[in-house]
Structures are given as structure tokens and as C-alpha cells.
Amino acid sequence: MPTISTRRRSLQLGAAAVLALGLPLTAAQAQSDWPTKPIRMVVGFPAGSITDTVARIMSDHLSKTLGQPVVVENKPGANGSLGVGEVARATADGYTLLFTNSSSITINPQLYKKSPYKAKDFTPITVAVDAPFILIANPAWTQKNNIQNPKDMIGYAQRNPDRISYGSAGPGNIAHLSFTSWGNRTSTRMTHVPYKGSAQAQMAVMSGELDTMFETWAALPQIQAGKLKALAVTAPQRMKQLPNVPTMAEAGYDNFNVIFWLGLLGPANLPQPIVQKLYDASKSLAQDARATAALASLGEVVMLEPGKFSQRINKEVQEWGGAIQREGLSLD
């Protein structure tokens, strides 16, 4: 009968033989060793968008923390659905990730009849940034029509149906739905003009091609430069960057808190050890002063844990699903 030391030696030789023969590692070994090669981070929006900007800050930090390149791949189209759908179909091995925004996960699958994915097709990892919207407008337009706050805008819309033009990053995104909901709530009609991205819509407001839109913190530099006028924010409290700009509730519209999140997800059934490694690496960004400052200029840095992120998605799916049904919205 072999001794214990002989058995141990046999096991060691067996393991060495497996490696020498190039046999595949077990799932547990692969998860433990992850990552051993570059990681793709798919972004379903164009370069220069707020989603892309935050994704690149995150990918740079994760590359340093994980010891493997995390490469951003922009796959824009169909309001983010092309890139998001690609990740939904990817292998859940941690080498294909998704960085996206709340519209693409909680709204698009319920709005588009032919959506190639559902919210359940993803593993939530973390919310990096929360960004309330800012109701912005062209300064010359507001001055000409004496519009100084949301109430003034609604009054103008009631006197001039369909005259106000507002933009968004595409039909059915969160900014579009927010305006639609506001219009229905106030019995007003305004004209929606979709763009390929929020950056293009923001430029249209600055040029006077559009009158107004809900935009993220990406509008702050132009507001501070006087090129855009901020009328309200959709957060429960005022933004410290815009202390003189009221919330929508203060302007007379209660329960109008719209928060736009930007987060990291993987395909469904991503192994828990990989999820935890990604979350821990993301959370450590708080120790990177430069990266934290860059994110803080775009929204509130959150780094929400995976379980709470999952709960938030489920809650928002219900809320936006109800809004879509009430508004009778549906897109092909």
C-alpha cells in the first residue's frame, strides 16, 4: 500500500501532467486565476458620450488594479441596444463586460418590441456614478420668451402647443421619457427631436437649433460658461455645483426625481468570484484621487455593491415599465 507521502507525490505528478498536456483548467481554477488575458468592456454609445467617458475612467483604473488591459469597445446604435445585446449573448467568463446606462437596461427592453435582451440577461456588478438630470435651455430663447423656471416653460407650452422643441439621445431613452411624462402630467405638447447622442443634442441647444432638453452633468461646463441656462435639477436636493438652481419639486413638480446611473455589468450567470473581484477593483477607485475627481465632475461617485445594484434594477424595471404602459409607448 502506498504511503501518504507517495500518494501526495502521485497527485503532484498528476497535476503537472495536466498542465504539461495543456488540458483545460477546471471552472474553479479559471475563476481563481481570472483574469489571465485582456478584458473587453463594451459601450453601446459613441465616443465622447458621458457613458463612454465614465467607461474609460473605469477601464483605466481596472486595468491597473487587475493587471490586465481592459479595452473599451464602442458599439453604438439603436439607443445602445446593439452593444448591450452583444454582451447579453457573450460567454459569462469575465472577459466580456458591459458599461452602460440605466436607459439601456431598465427601459429599452420594455420599450422596443424586438429588443434582443431583457434586464435578467445581465449580472450587475456596480453602479459607478449617479447623475440627476439638469433641465437646460438655450439662453437666448429663454430671454426672448421670458422663461426663467419650469413653470414658465410649461406656461409657454400651454399657450403654444408643439412649439417647444426638446432633444434626447434617442427615442425612448430616459431623458425622452422624462419629458413625455412631464408633458402628460401638465397637459402640454412639446416636440421631441432625437439625436445620435446627448452630446449632439446639447450642442443643438447651445446653437439654438433646439430649445431645451434634460441633460446630465456633462452640461455643467457650458452652464458655468453661460452658453446654457439651467432651469432645474431632477435630484431630491439641489446640486452643490448649481446651488441657485431649484429642484423640480421646488419648482412645483413633486415626485419628479430622475436619476441616471452609469454602471458595470456582465452577462447573466457571471461566476460570483469574478463579480466580487470586479466589484472590489471598482471600489478601490476611491483611493485614486485623480480618477475620483474625474468621475465626480460627471456625477455622484457611488460604487454600489452588486446585490443592491440588482435590487435597484428590479425596482426601476417596474417603475419605467409602468410609465411606458401609461404613456402607451412602443417602438419597433
Image (cartoon, rainbow, N blue to C red):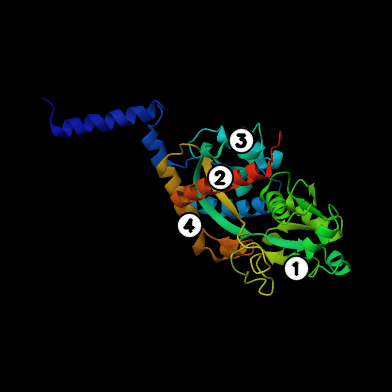
User: Which residue is label 1 attached to?
Assistant: 149
Q: Toward the viewer: 137 or 251? A: 251
Callout 3: SS: helix
User: Label 3 vs label 4: CA separation?
Assistant: 26 Å
Kind of residue indicated by mark 3: Gly
Kind of residue indicated by mark 2: Val
Callout 4: SS: helix
Tell me what residue is drawn at x 75 percent, y 68 percent. Answer: 149
User: Which residue is label 4 attached to?
Assistant: 283
User: Which residue is label 3 attached to?
Assistant: 85
Number of other residues with Cα within 10 Å of mark 2, as a class: few under 14, some 14 to 19, many 20 or more: many
User: Which residue is label 2 attached to?
Assistant: 317
| Residue 83 in the image, given as x and y percentages of width and height | 64, 38
Q: Relative to 241, is 211 on the left or the right?
A: right
Tell me what residue is drawn at x 65 percent, y 69 percent. Answer: 250
Residue 117 higher or lower than 263, as above or below = above
| Residue 256 in the image, given as x and y percentages of width and height | 63, 59
Check the image and name the residue furthest to the left.
Answer: 1
Q: Toward the viewer: 56 or 244? A: 244
User: Label 1 vs label 4: CA separation?
Assistant: 38 Å
User: Label 4 vs label 2: CA separation?
Assistant: 25 Å
Q: Toward the viewer: 145 or 8? A: 145
User: Label 1 vs label 2: CA separation?
Assistant: 30 Å
